[in-house]
Amino acid sequence: MAAPEISQSRLFEWLTGDDDSRMCKDIPEEACDEQPRNFFLHLLAALGNKLADELSSARLVLPWLMGVIGAPVWMVGLLVPIRESGSLLPQLFVAGVIRLQPQRKWAWVLGGALQAASALLLALLALFGNGGLGGTLVLAVLVALSLARGLSSIATKDVLGKTISKQRRGTLMGWSGSVAGAVTLAAGAVLMLFDERPGELALAVLLIIAALGWALNALCAARIAESPGAVEGGENAWDSIKLGLRLMRDDHTFRHFNVARALLLASALALPYIALLGQQQSGTELGGLGILIVVSGLAGMLASPLWGKRADVSSRRVMRDAGLGTTLCCLLVAAAAWLPGGWSETVWPYALGYGLLVMVHAGVRLGRKTYLVDMANQDQRALYVALSNTLTGALMLLVGGAIGALAQWLGTTALLAILAATALCAAVSAQRLPEVEQ
């Protein structure tokens, strides 16, 4: 057993760029010896989660599912808001419950298991669903899946803060993003093999594989060595709301961070519109979308480790630079659409812009996740994460609707210019945040 443990420690040190695998900051002393093993369990869990996310994507796979079963078109527009907001909005309400558990990994395990069960139900609907009733059931299952996703999200960050040392968390999330990018690349390559929409059986197979990914996520979470933590301060939902409002009022840094995070939503909101613009301009359907997925996978593989290393030095600067990058990407894609000539009528300039924005969005995600985990202390980390995510979920519902109206009224290119200005404001806001990695 000694040899594998030594190899694991050496690989851990190579991936993190450190010479001492027992370096511990802001985690219990007893967690130091388990850190290399926990690092790889976190990494494998992230792989399963990302695989499942891509193969049940509300932007790609589930719209096809709705089309195959003949659901009304208006239901397709509800997929992304439900998927994103459903996982964020309830987190403040479950934070107090999670705080009552000495080991928070079991909440993570429950979330992973519920997501796996939801994916299996979606696979059954791909085979047997039909019409409006089938579409309604898909949306209902997606609500359950999103709520389970929110449970896993808050527990994952809390367990990460207890088991992985500060100045290594960004590196872990960076490597997770790189592995996830490879999975996205493989998923896109498979989808490009289909000339038309995948049929019921193909969709069911994709969703069953997604269920297996979440099962792997839950299994890895169960095997993480997590020291029991303090359970004082666990509140019911109303107490959590009151405490959260006090934190927003009294903690200037936390309030400022949430303003910057809200403005950085521009990167997430711009991605589907760049894909839509590419489809409108090029006239391609599945082939163009497959290209976008492959480009997204390559971009994720290249970007995440670089952002992760930088986030461990200064997550504030990563958020700032990602805001500037979002501004540049939105303006470049809008300009490509305005340019005359046949080049702008192919999918490739938009695929390039999409890939660049995926790289930038990886910085947004890694920067704000690392900043939030490093800003909060161990006792209040779960509440900080839950409150921030709940606020973001509410904003996504409100802003997502407004963005859709603007796109309908002004057009996609004008909307990208508006999002570019929003991202520039995000960069200015992030620049003024205090450092938390020192």
Image (cartoon, rainbow, N blue to C red):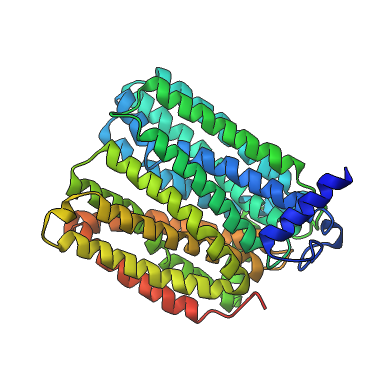
Q: Where is residue 320 in the image (x, y as percent from the top left)?
A: 47, 74
Furthest toward the top, the residue is 128
- The number of numbered discs placed on residues in the rendered structure image is 0
Going 44% across and 55% down the picture, which residue do you hit? 299
Furthest toward the left, the residue is 340
Q: Establish if 201 lies above or below 311.
A: above
Horizontal relation, residue 121 to residue 129: left or right: right
**Residue 49 occupies quadrant:** top right
**In front of the other: 140 or 283:** 283
Horizontal relation, residue 273 to residue 265: left or right: left
**In front of the other: 250 or 297:** 297
Q: Establish if 296 lies above or below 309.
A: above
Q: Establish if 433 lies above or below 93.
A: below
Q: Is residue 353 visible?
A: yes
Q: Establish if 72 lies above or below 371.
A: above
Which quadrant of the rendered structure holds the N terminus? top right
Going 62% across and 40% down the picture, which residue do you hit? 111
Q: Is residue 118 visible?
A: no
Going 80% across and 56% down the picture, which residue do you hit? 229
Which quadrant of the rendered structure holds the C terminus? bottom right
Going 37% across and 63% down the picture, which residue do you hit? 266
Q: Position of residue 308 (x, y in %)?
A: 58, 63
Q: Position of residue 172 (x, y in %)?
A: 64, 57
**Residue 193 occupies quadrant:** top left
Q: Where is residue 303 in the image (x, y as percent from the top left)?
A: 49, 60
